[in-house]
Amino acid sequence: MRNLFAQFRQLLQPGALTVATVLYAEDGSATCELPGGGRIRVRGEAQEGSRVYVQDGVIQGHAPDLPLIIDTV
């Protein structure tokens, strides 16, 4: 039998921190493009064309504009 407290703690853990590119920004929210090509709508202030860190649907901060390398191994 699994520990119920451990299961509860897994529910509270934050999601993964992802770098995304802002496509559109207005009224405290933005549409961002993820590295795989998907798009998400997030809360937070950002300028169009900038790169941001996104976690759980919220912009956490600005990300550096560095080249993106996706390892497919």
Image (cartoon, rainbow, N blue to C red):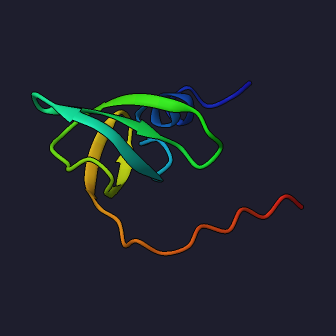
Q: Is residue 5 above or below residue 16?
A: above
Q: Nearer the viewer, residue 25 or 59?
A: 25
Is 40 on the left or on the right of 58, as rendered?
A: right
Is 56 on the left or on the right of 27, as rendered?
A: right
Residue 13 location (% of width, % of height): 44, 41
Residue 8 location (% of width, % of height): 47, 28
All told, the count of numbered labels is 0
Is 21 on the left or on the right of 47, as rendered?
A: right
Q: Is residue 61 above or below residue 16?
A: below
Q: Nearer the viewer, residue 56 or 62?
A: 62
Residue 41 location (% of width, % of height): 36, 27
For the point 50% across and 47% down, which residue is it?
16
For the point 31% across and 32% down, which residue is it?
42
Residue 5 location (% of width, % of height): 49, 32
Q: Is residue 18 above or below residue 71?
A: above
For the point 15% across and 30% down, which residue is it?
26
Q: Can you tell which quarter of the image residue 67 is in?
A: bottom right
Q: Nearer the viewer, residue 26 or 73?
A: 26
Name the quadrant of the C terminus: bottom right
Can you name the residue that lies furthest to the left here?
27
Q: Is residue 63 above or below residue 35?
A: below
For the point 20% across and 50% down, which residue is it?
47
Can you name the residue that lies furthest to the right here?
73
Q: Can you tell which quarter of the image residue 57 is in?
A: top left
Name the quadrant of the N terminus: top right
Q: Nearer the viewer, residue 55 or 71?
A: 71
